[in-house]
Image (cartoon, rainbow, N blue to C red):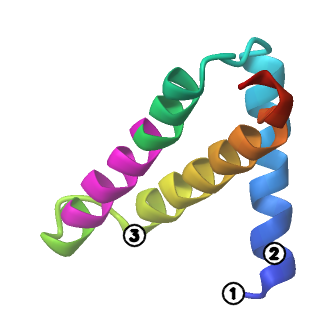
């Protein structure tokens, strides 16, 4: 997949998530937990795809969600806060 396609998907997911959940945790532990939750869902989707219990499409979807939340974490990170 071309990087342009990946970035379009990730940025679209970021925009969707920000509209659906406009409040982002200010606490870095909670914000990091959101990213970790998505990464956990990616691992589960990958395991399920490997065991032929789910499609590879779900794995791609979860990878996009993880990347979008990592970008959101970075976007909302405030160096001055600590």
Residue under label 2, please give it.
5
Question: Dot 1: what SS?
Answer: loop
Q: Tell me the magenta residue range.
A: 37-47
Disc 1, disc 3: CB below 8 Å? no
The residue lying at 52 percent from left, 41 percent from top is 35
Q: Earlier in the sequence, mark 1 or mark 3?
A: 1
Which SS does the magenta portion mostly show? Answer: helix
The residue lying at 85 percent from left, 37 percent from top is 15
| Viewer-nearest residue: 29 or 64 | 29
Q: Is residue 22 above or below residue 69?
A: above
Give residue 50's position: percent from left, percent from top. Answer: 20, 74
| Circle 1 residues within 10 Å: few <14, some 14–19, many ≥20 | few
> Disc number at residue 56?
3
Tell whether 61 sits left or right of 40: right
Question: Separation of disc 1 and disc 2 at Cα?
Answer: 7 Å
Question: Dot 3: what SS?
Answer: helix
Is residue 77 a member of the stretch shown in magenta?
Answer: no
Tell whether 43 sits left or right of 35: left
Tell whether 61 sits left or right of 59: right
Q: Residue furthest left?
A: 51
Disc 1, disc 2: CB below 8 Å? yes
Residue under label 1, please give it.
1
Give residue 47's position: percent from left, percent from top. Answer: 20, 64
Disc 3, disc 2: CB below 8 Å? no
């Amino acid at each position: 997949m071309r990087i342009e396609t990946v970035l379009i998907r990730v940025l679209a997911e970021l925009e969707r998530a920000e509209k659906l959940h406009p409040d982002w945790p200010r606490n870095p532990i909670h914000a990091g937990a959101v990213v970790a939750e998505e990464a956990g869902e990616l691992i589960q989707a990958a395991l399920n795809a490997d065991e032929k219990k789910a499609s590879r499409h779900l794995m791609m979807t979860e990878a996009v969600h993880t990347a979008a939340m990592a970008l959101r974490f970075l976007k909302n990170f405030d160096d001055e806060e600590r």
